[in-house]
């Protein structure tokens, strides 16, 4: 186990080098990620025309939500880890990894962390620029950010997204093509995860159901926690559910991996 | 005429290839449908709180979003699969096989693949559109319907222009798969009512990259009748951006160096 842990910095460094090999591709990806914020500014500006509140949100409040979500995305959203894992399985590239004394989950976690660090660096300029421009157009409620509530939720979101990604991509042991499954879950994450709109804008009974699902803890919960929209009780309950779902998907990924390895065959060098 | 015949041949070949993976067809229909439901759910949530956005009521907004979906699905069926493969063709040097053929490379690249699934979703979008038109009690004339179809074609040209422009960056950037993400992201603009936009945003996305016109002008034609000035502006600007991005592709092509031996 100690040997495995000692190898992690090397894997992390390898991941960083791999990500930064295509810097422009990465920079473009990060730049495009800021564009929805601009669209939200225009669209919600029209929604708020002639009114101060929509649900519990002011115009500045809803824009702050989308702006903070950009940061949540940058920290916790896997980039193409799912497709990389599926390719490794489909093309028999697991062989050299299986020979190493390093659990596959830990290996992928180190690569995921490297990917997030590289992305944060690439996204720093475009995201900061978007935030500065937006804060000149409207008063973002950045001052009321709650880091004590937000940081554990942000970490939980990264764990949850990583473990869910692992579960989905490990289905490549059984399915030739997992991209449809991945895109289907993306759609669910966007809708039920609070990516398109804050979930508390949903009618109350729907919101009560949606907040029990794991997707709500990928984007909505960390964003709401950072924005300071959650009281202590709601934050603690949310954190329990978030880490509970993350633990559940990690255990599930472990079982899928073991079952998948029994089916796995690879030939050639 | 020769290009049309060639395109029909490419479609036949691509359809045969596509029908080899029938299960994939149903799965992708479900995926695209989920993304459309997501947009309709967003409208549902917004209109749960407000009656109108920039002068558009719920059914009008559904017409706008369904029109946008229709354009996207037709584009995804016929042109996008080929265009999105350009970065890989350039990186692997397989573009050689395209360049050797006696037809314009931009045409061959964009029509080389076909996806049948999006056509089913286009049909679903048409049904949702018809429901919203019926809900508003609209009875568009034959001329308005004809104009609507013509404007959908203009919308396809704008999609072609944006994606062609983005994937052509692959001649400068080794791995340009992120430009696809850019394409998906930039088309969020097309779902906004034009009246919601103002200032530089409206100018840029009306005249430079006419994304604000892609769904707005055809949807307005159904809702408010034919608008000659907006229609003419859209037709002209779509032709211009398509021509410009094809030139950009040809300019990039000059940098292409075959990877084969």
Image (cartoon, grey):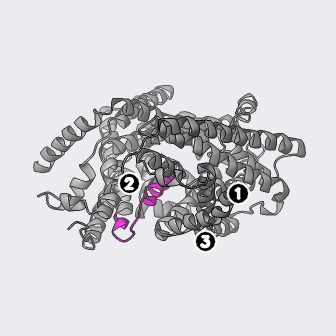
Instruction: For label 1, count other residues whose C-alpha is less than 10 Å away and answer few (under 14), some (14-19) or many (20+).
Output: many
From what the image shows, is residue A130 above or below residue B47?
below
- Helix, strand or loop under label 2: loop
- Helix, strand or loop under label 1: helix
Give the residue pinned by disc 3.
Answer: A125
Find the magenta span and give its range: B168-190
Left or right: residue A164 compared with residue B153: right
Q: Nearer the viewer, residue A102 or B46?
A: A102
Q: Are marks 3 and 2 in contact (CB under 8 Å)?
A: no
Q: Nearer the viewer, residue B238 or A218?
A: A218
Q: Residue at x 56, y 59 (%)?
A: A33
How many marks are shown on the rendered structure?
3
**Chain of the residue on which disc 3 is drawn:** A
* Rendering coords of residue B169 (x, y %): 37, 67
Q: Is residue B176 magenta?
A: yes
Left or right: residue B126 compared with residue A247: left
- Helix, strand or loop under label 3: helix
Residue B243 makes an appearance in the image: yes
Marks 3, 1 in one chain? yes
Query: Which quadrant of the rendered structure holds the C terminus of chain A?
Result: bottom left
Q: Nearer the viewer, mark 3 or mark 2?
A: 2
Give the residue pinned by disc 2.
Answer: A269
Instruction: For label 3, count other residues whose C-alpha is less than 10 Å away and answer few (under 14), some (14-19) or many (20+).
Output: some
Q: CA distance from mark 3 to mark 2?
A: 43 Å
* Rendering coords of residue A187 (x, y %): 55, 40
Instruction: For label 2, count other residues whose C-alpha is less than 10 Å away and answer few (under 14), some (14-19) or many (20+).
Output: few
* Rendering coords of residue B205 (x, y %): 46, 60
Q: CA distance from mark 2 to mark 1?
A: 46 Å
**Chain of the residue on which disc 2 is drawn:** A
Left or right: residue A3 compared with residue B230: right
Query: Upstream in the sequence, badge 2 or badge 1?
Result: 1
Marks 2, 1 in one chain? yes
């Amino acid at each position: 186990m100690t040997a495995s842990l000692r190898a992690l910095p090397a894997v992390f460094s390898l991941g960083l080098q791999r990500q930064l090999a295509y810097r422009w591709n990465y920079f473009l990806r990060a730049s495009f990620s800021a564009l929805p914020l601009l669209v939200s500014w225009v669209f919600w500006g029209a929604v708020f025309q002639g009114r101060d509140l929509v649900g519990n949100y002011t115009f500045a409040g809803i824009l702050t939500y989308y702006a903070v979500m950009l940061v949540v995305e940058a920290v916790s959203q896997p980039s193409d880890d799912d497709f990389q894992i599926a390719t490794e399985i489909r093309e028999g590239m697991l062989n050299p990894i299986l020979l190493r004394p390093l659990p596959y989950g830990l290996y992928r976690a180190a690569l995921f962390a490297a990917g997030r660090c590289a992305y944060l660096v690439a996204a720093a300029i475009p995201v900061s620029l978007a935030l500065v421009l937006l804060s000149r157009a409207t008063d973002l409620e950045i001052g009321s950010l709650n880091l004590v509530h937000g940081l554990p939720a942000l970490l939980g979101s990264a764990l949850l997204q990583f473990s869910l990604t692992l579960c989905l991509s490990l289905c490549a042991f059984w399915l030739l093509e997992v991209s449809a499954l991945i895109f289907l879950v993306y759609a669910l994450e966007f809708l039920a995860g609070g990516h398109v709109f804050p979930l508390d804008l949903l009618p109350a009974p729907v919101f009560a159901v949606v907040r029990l699902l794991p997707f709500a803890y990928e984007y909505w919960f960390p964003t709401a926690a950072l924005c300071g929209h959650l009281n202590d009780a709601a934050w603690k309950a949310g954190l329990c559910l978030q880490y509970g779902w993350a633990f559940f998907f990690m255990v599930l990924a472990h079982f899928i991996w073991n079952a998948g390895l029994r089916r796995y065959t690879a030939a050639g060098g | 005429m020769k290009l049309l015949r060639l395109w029909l041949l490419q479609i036949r070949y691509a359809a045969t290839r596509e029908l080899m993976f029938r299960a994939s067809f149903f799965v992708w229909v479900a995926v695209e449908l989920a993304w459309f439901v997501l947009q309709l759910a967003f409208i549902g949530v917004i209109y749960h709180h407000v009656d109108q956005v920039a002068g558009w009521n719920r059914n009008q907004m559904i017409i706008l979003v369904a029109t946008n979906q229709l354009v996207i699905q037709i584009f995804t069926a016929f042109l996008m699969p080929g265009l999105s493969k350009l970065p890989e063709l350039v990186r692997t040097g397989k573009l050689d096989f395209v360049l050797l053929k006696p037809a314009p490379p931009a045409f061959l690249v964009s029509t080389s693949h076909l996806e049948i699934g999006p056509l089913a979703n286009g049909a679903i979008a048409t049904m949702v559109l018809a429901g919203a038109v019926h809900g508003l009690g609209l009875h568009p004339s034959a001329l308005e319907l004809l104009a609507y179809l013509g404007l959908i074609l203009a919308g396809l040209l704008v999609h072609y222009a944006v994606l062609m422009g983005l994937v052509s960056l692959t001649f400068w950037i080794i791995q340009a798969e992120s430009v696809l993400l850019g394409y998906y992201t930039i088309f969020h603009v097309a779902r906004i009512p034009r009246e919601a936009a103002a200032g530089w945003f409206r100018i840029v996305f009306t005249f430079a990259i006419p994304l604000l016109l892609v769904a707005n002008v055809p949807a307005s034609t159904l809702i408010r009748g034919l608008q000659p000035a907006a229609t003419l502006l859209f037709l002209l600007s779509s032709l211009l951006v398509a021509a410009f991005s094809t030139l950009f592709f040809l300019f990039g092509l000059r940098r292409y160096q075959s990877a084969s031996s």
